């Protein structure tokens, strides 16, 4: 067996073991109709696993779900039905996140958090609950009058698992970082102790709190707000996990504001509270984190902009002085050389200023687009011939041909192609080939720019077109100048033209390929 296959098999075994153990634990906690439990860790775990390791891990989930239900007393066909629902739950949840929302595992955007808590969690949980309870009904394990009573706790248990377990596993999979500041580490430890103390105070029988004292539960929010403002999303996710664990344990022991004679009713009320708490906490954390990152990007942008503007301005001043000197000396041949260099710096300065102006226009909705039919082949050829003169270390080539016209703003598409090719040149500091691929189908034309450069970390590829965003490079310690606006401007231009733009790392070789499509002229 190859090392890759062995690693895959070991991963499946580990996933199966964790799924089976956590499922066994959940079913031991006063499960409704023996199979529906309000504490169901496997759902959040399985969705996180597929997000982190892709769909190939589904067999471990299916086997874990099948065997745990079979050993819990389910007939074999019922166990197969429940296992199918649990597997589809994870697969459909991940499909929804990836396909419709472009979900990023770091959950660094509000869009990602909302997609998880408002779309994937309720819909995926509904699939599992429906498959599972229907299997129990047809298998004769429950009666029709017990259907809803079984379905609701099944669904609630799965939803809360996605809201608590999935964010915790995803966010902490990126490792621990306190910027090596001992003060931050000490503050986090103190925060953890406060969270534990608050959790015990609210839910534990140690303090003998009266059952009807429900207002005490709101003490969970100050530590969560503290974590969101001072730390970030992963710390908030950890606090939610701690609170949830303490609350469930103590409620089952008959303590805390949610305790009652019926343990299932107690857990149902508790889980509804935890759902609301998770929703508000995760949204607060991501909004604070996004604002913090945006402020950081603005600071970096101002610093980089001053540097990027200073470089061509300084060069223009220097070359203009040299040109003046050469003209005074009547050295006209040498003057031409420096005029070309002066022209190059003016081009860079003009392009930078235009990109900055475009950002302002796009934000105000005042960007001007003048569409007309034209052939992209001529435009691509013109751009390649022009940019080839600006680099000696790179070979620019065109592969393919577009036979159909597009209706677009020629100058804006020119701007996009130049941005992508310049980007390819800039991120290929060692030189090499830059290939511009051209093709068309019945409905659209596609241009792609392929380089052999530094590449982009796959965890950041979906954010590469965000305003002021500069993704970390795959190659460490590689310094590349830029403001993080060229790709954003290009993306907005393509969107205005009803096209699509995206990027992929090259599979068989290093570097990346940027793609964009545009609609073709009808009946051409």
Image (spheres, grey):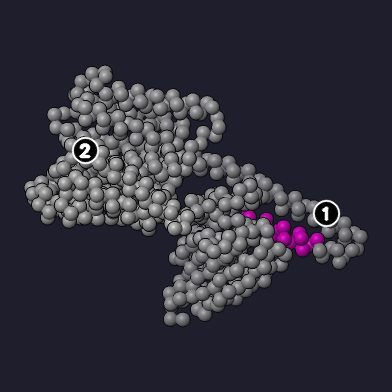
What residue do we see at 20% from left, 49% from top? 70
Q: Nearer the viewer, residue 464 or 153?
A: 153
What residue do we see at 53% from left, 77% from top? 402
What residue do we see at 37% from left, 27% from top? 195
Q: Is residue 33 visible?
A: yes
User: Which residue is at the far bottom?
Assistant: 524
Horizontally, residue 336 falls left or right of residue 418, namely right
- Residue that label 2 marks: 28
User: Which residue is at the far top?
Assistant: 207
User: Picture coordinates of residue 398 (x, y %)?
Assistant: 60, 73
Q: Is residue 283 visible?
A: no
Label 1: state its secondary structure.
helix
User: Picture coordinates of residue 163 (x, y %)?
Assistant: 32, 42
Q: Label 1 crowding class (10 Å Cα cut-off): few <14, some 14-19, many 20+?
A: few
Horizontally, residue 486 falls left or right of residue 323, namely left
What segment carries the magenta color?
338-353
User: Picture coordinates of residue 284 (x, y %)?
Assistant: 39, 38
- Residue that label 1 marks: 321
Can residue 350 be found in the magenta stretch? Answer: yes
Q: Nearer the viewer, residue 212 or 20?
A: 20
């Amino acid at each position: 067996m190859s090392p890759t296959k062995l690693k895959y098999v070991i991963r499946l075994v580990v996933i199966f073991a964790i799924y089976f153990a956590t499922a066994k634990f959940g079913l031991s906690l006063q499960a409704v109709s023996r199979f529906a439990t309000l504490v169901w860790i496997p759902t959040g775990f399985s969705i996180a696993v597929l997000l982190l390791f892709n769909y190939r891990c589904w067999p471990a989930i299916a086997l874990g779900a099948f065997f745990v239900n079979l050993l819990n007393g389910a007939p074999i066909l019922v166990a197969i039905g429940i296992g199918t629902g649990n597997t589809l739950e994870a697969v459909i949840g991940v499909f929804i996140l990836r396909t419709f929302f472009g979900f990023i595992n770091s959950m660094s955007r509000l869009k990602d958090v909302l997609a998880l808590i408002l779309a994937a969690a309720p819909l995926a949980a509904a699939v599992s609950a429906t498959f599972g309870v229907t299997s129990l009904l047809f298998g004769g394990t429950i009666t029709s009058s017990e259907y809803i009573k079984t379905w609701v706790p099944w669904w609630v248990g799965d939803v809360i698992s996605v809201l608590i377990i999935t964010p915790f596993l995803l966010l902490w999979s990126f490792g621990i970082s306190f910027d090596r500041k001992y003060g931050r580490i000490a503050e986090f430890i103190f925060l953890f102790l406060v969270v534990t103390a608050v959790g015990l105070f609210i839910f534990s029988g140690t303090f003998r709190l009266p059952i009807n004292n429900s207002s005490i539960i709101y003490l969970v929010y100050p530590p969560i707000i503290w974590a969101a403002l001072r730390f970030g999303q992963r710390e908030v996710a950890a606090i939610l996990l701690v609170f949830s664990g303490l609350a469930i344990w103590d409620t089952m022991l008959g303590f805390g504001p949610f305790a009652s004679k019926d343990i299932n009713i107690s857990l149902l009320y508790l889980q509804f509270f935890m759902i609301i708490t998770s929703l508000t906490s995760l949204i607060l954390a991501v909004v604070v984190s996004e604002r913090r990152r945006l402020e950081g990007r603005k600071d970096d942008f101002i610093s980089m902009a001053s540097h990027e503007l200073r470089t061509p301005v300084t060069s223009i001043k220097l070359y203009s002085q040299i040109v003046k000197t050469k003209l005074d000396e009547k050295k006209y041949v040498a003057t031409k050389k420096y005029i070309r260099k002066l022209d190059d710096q003016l081009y860079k300065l003009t392009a930078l200023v235009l990109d900055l102006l475009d950002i302002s226009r796009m934000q105000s909705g005042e960007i001007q687009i003048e569409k007309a039919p034209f052939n992209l082949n001529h435009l691509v050829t013109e751009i390649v011939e022009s940019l080839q003169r600006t680099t000696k270390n790179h070979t620019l080539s065109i592969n393919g041909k577009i036979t159909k016209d597009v209706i677009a703003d020629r100058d804006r598409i020119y701007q996009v192609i130049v941005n992508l090719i310049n980007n390819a040149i800039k991120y290929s500091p060692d030189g090499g080939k830059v290939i511009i691929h051209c093709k068309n189908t019945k409905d659209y034309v596609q241009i792609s720019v392929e380089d052999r450069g530094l590449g982009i970390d796959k965890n950041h590829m979906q954010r590469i077109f965000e305003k002021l965003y500069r993704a970390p490079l795959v190659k460490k310690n590689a310094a590349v100048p830029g403001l993080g606006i060229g790709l954003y401007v290009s993306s907005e231009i393509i969107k205005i033209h009803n096209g699509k733009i995206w990027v992929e790392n090259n599979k068989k070789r290093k570097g990346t390929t940027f793609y964009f499509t545009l609609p073709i002229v009808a009946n051409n």
